[in-house]
Image (spheres, rainbow, N blue to C red):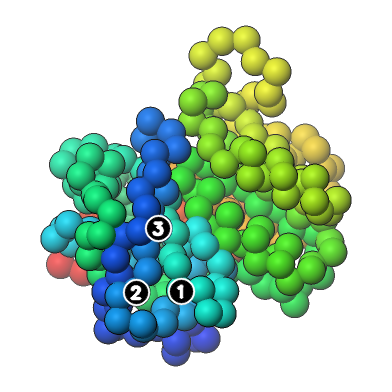
Amino acid sequence: MTVETDPVSAAETTDRPVTCAVTAVESVTPEIRIVRMRPVHGESFAYRAGQYARVAFGGFDERDYSIASRPVPGDPELAFHIRNMGGGGPSQYVADNLAVGERVSVRGPFGATYLRPEKPGPILAICGGSGLAPMTAIVAEALAMGLTQPIHLYFGARRERDIYMEDHFRTLAEQHPNFAFTPVLSDPDGPTDRRTGFIHQAAAADTPTLQGCVAYLAGPPPMVEAAAAMCRDHGMAETDIHADAFIGEAERRQRDGAV
Ligand SMILES: Cc1cc2nc3c(=O)[nH]c(=O)nc-3n(C[C@H](O)[C@H](O)[C@H](O)COP(=O)(O)OP(=O)(O)OC[C@H]3O[C@@H](n4cnc5c(N)ncnc54)[C@H](O)[C@@H]3O)c2cc1C
């Protein structure tokens, strides 16, 4: 997979952390918390829908987290979807201990997987687990901007209990005829009426050619790799595939050559 470079977001990126206060922690699946926060000193945090920030929770080192909110002038609230990876790391701290009112440091924005409204093709958003975070922002921004091309969000979850924000996306689909939401279970724990199998295979089965489409992908690295390969195999241009693989911190440091 090619790594995109993005001079625009690089120019806007600040190394100065913004201090935020947690305003809500919501448990949406056994493993995922939606965390909302606001800058405490009236500072602004500029970003594009789909980008990520480096966030330090509870005195731990920073980790990368996609921003699930979209930038709204006058509303500085940021939202994140944090999946508990266990092992005593920051994500477990968020699941077990993070409280409303706690201070969190947020730095960024980073990443080139953000909405490209100038691209007119149908939008295919494919994500797994907490990869729903940047897709929530991208879909919200696309619909708020009044984009009229088809927008299809495929959300991969292992079991029924891992599906979240379904009511939100069903409501959006009722309000916007160009938006469709398809959750897909990869490992259902019983009989189900839902689509099943791998998420990229579900998307491929629905559309014989993806030529001219624009893809946004986020979630576990194997899922993102498989979805990107599927997009290429179905005729999508490499430059129209925008992907964030949620690699762990150790892997990220190795990739970036950090000590
Ligand atoms: C661009 C980008 C965006 C991201 N956005 C999000 C997001 O929106 N939401 C989100 O929840 N995460 C996201 N991540 C992943 C996040 O940055 C952390 O790597 C993740 O939360 C790991 O948890 P931790 O920091 O608590 O784990 P660590 O302290 O690094 O490790 C704790 C335990 O978890 C294990 N672990 C860590 N990562 C993985 C992994 N990928 N697979 C299997 N085991 C692992 C470790 O081996 C260890 O046992 C993103 C990553 C990238 C690169």
Mark 2 is on which residue type?
Pro
- Give the farthest residue toward the top: 191
The residue wearing badge 2 is 39
Q: Are marks 1 and 2 in contact (CB under 8 Å)?
A: yes
The mark that comes first in sequence, 1 or 2, is 2
Q: Position of residue 54 (x, y in %)?
A: 32, 67
The residue wearing badge 1 is 76
Q: Position of residue 249 (x, y in %)?
A: 27, 56
Task: Residue at 18% x, 38% y: name it.
Answer: 87
- In the rendered image, the vertical position of residue 229 relative to residue 205, given as above or below: below
Which type of secondary structure does the marked residue at label 1 adopt? Answer: loop
Q: CA distance from mark 1 to mark 2?
A: 7 Å
Q: Position of residue 114 (x, y in %)?
A: 57, 69
- The answer, for residue 237, to whether it is visible in the render is no
Task: Residue at 65% x, 52% y: name it.
Answer: 125
Mark 3 is on which residue type?
Arg
Q: Position of residue 11 (x, y in %)?
A: 44, 89
Q: CA distance from mark 3 to mark 2?
A: 11 Å
Residue 36, numbered circle: 3
Q: 142 or 87, which is in the foreground?
A: 142
Mark 1 is on which residue type?
Pro
**Structural crowding at the residue carrying mark 1, measured as other residues with C-alpha within 10 Å and reported as few (<14), some (14–19) or many (≥20):** some
Side of 105 where 46 appears, left or right: right
The mark that comes first in sequence, 3 or 1, is 3
Q: Are marks 3 and 1 in contact (CB under 8 Å)?
A: no
- In the rendered image, the vertical position of residue 46 relative to residue 242, given as above or below: below
Which type of secondary structure does the marked residue at label 3 adopt? Answer: strand
**Structural crowding at the residue carrying mark 2, measured as other residues with C-alpha within 10 Å and reported as few (<14), some (14–19) or many (≥20):** many
**Structural crowding at the residue carrying mark 3, measured as other residues with C-alpha within 10 Å and reported as few (<14), some (14–19) or many (≥20):** many
- Give the farthest residue toward the bottom: 11
Q: CA distance from mark 3 to mark 1?
A: 10 Å
- The answer, for residue 11, to whether it is visible in the render is yes
